[in-house]
Image (tube, rainbow, N blue to C red):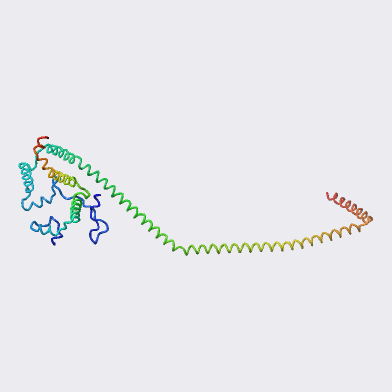
Amino acid sequence: VLHTTRPLHTTQQCLAPLPPLPEKGGEVRYGLIPEEFFQFLYPKTGVTGPYMLGTGLLLYFLSKEIYVINHETVAAACILSVIIYGVKKFGSDVAAFADKLNEEKVARALSVKNEAIKDLEAAIEQEKKEQWRVEGRSYLFDAKRNNIAMLLETNYRERLLTVYNEVKKRLDYQVALQNLKRQKEQDHMIQWVEKNVVQSITPQQQKESIAKCILDLKALSKTAQAAV
Amino acid sequence: GPLSERRLVDVRLGELPAWLATCNLSPQGLLGGVRKAWSSYYDKYINVKRGGPAGISMLLAGYCLLSYGWNYQHISKISFLVSV
């Protein structure tokens, strides 16, 4: 609730980031009287002026019974002494604790901001890299075109080889056919000639040839025995 | 600067009636004045990075004085002083 009382956008030109909070509050002496009061009285009365004024006022109130001393005076004195003792003893610790809390808050907000900045910078880097990659598109397409040309060439040569093999097979078949035919004719002719020759040999001729062979062999064996 | 735009602390004693004449004394005006006074006090003594006891102690002291002033009639009666 207290924060809403700070006037925002009261003038025409409002600076968008709010100015930071002031480091220290206004100077206050003895925790009760602002420093401006002492500065106000300084030119006319010097340094001791406000203290004289305070003492005089206090004595006047006491003597004229404008301030009545009653049981509440004692209670106020005890409470004040306890409060002052507490503040003097634990003030700095509490202040350090509150400062730590504040620092943590600020550090968290700052970390969020830094994270956001880092993420955006990384995104910028990525974008630049993508832009650089785009320049390499032409090389990519050249490589792809080369691949396709090689595939076409390979396919063409495979088919050429197939055609060659098929034609060779057919021609080989024809050659083998001719060879076979000639072979068969030759065999058949040889067989026919042998058959006719064998048929033409009469038994008389067979006996004469066998006798001649035996005579030859005997002659040969004589010459061979002589040689040995 | 001109009289109507100066704050109360900058107005000299002789010009006080004239300044009072210029200020807005309707309920809204008074409320606006109260709000401005509170916000200036708040911004000076409480809404700072490293404040001290001064911010609330002055408020408590003012409250003590005000309540003493309101109850003065009752406190100064003899019957009250004798009873406690």
Question: B76 left or right of A222?
Answer: left
Q: Which residue sits furthest top?
A: B83
Question: B77 left or right of A222?
Answer: left
Q: Where is residue A207 in the image (x, y as percent from the top left)?
A: 93, 54
Residue at position x 12%, y 59% from top? Answer: B21
How many numbered marks, from 0 up? 0
- Residue closer to the observer: A72 or A161: A72
Q: Where is residue A179 in the image (x, y as percent from the top left)?
A: 77, 61
Q: Where is residue B28 in the image (x, y as percent from the top left)?
A: 20, 56
The answer to whether B31 is drawn above or below residue A170 in the figure is above
Residue at position x 15%, y 48% from top? Answer: A28
Q: Position of residue A117 (x, y in %)?
A: 34, 55
Q: Which residue sits furthest right?
A: A204
> In the figure, residue A12 lies in which quadrant?
bottom left
Residue at position x 81%, y 60% from top? Answer: A184
- Residue closer to the observer: B23 or B26: B26
- Residue closer to the observer: A1 or B75: B75
Question: A191 left or right of A137?
Answer: right
- Residue closer to the observer: A15 or B3: B3
Residue at position x 7%, y 58% from top? Answer: B14
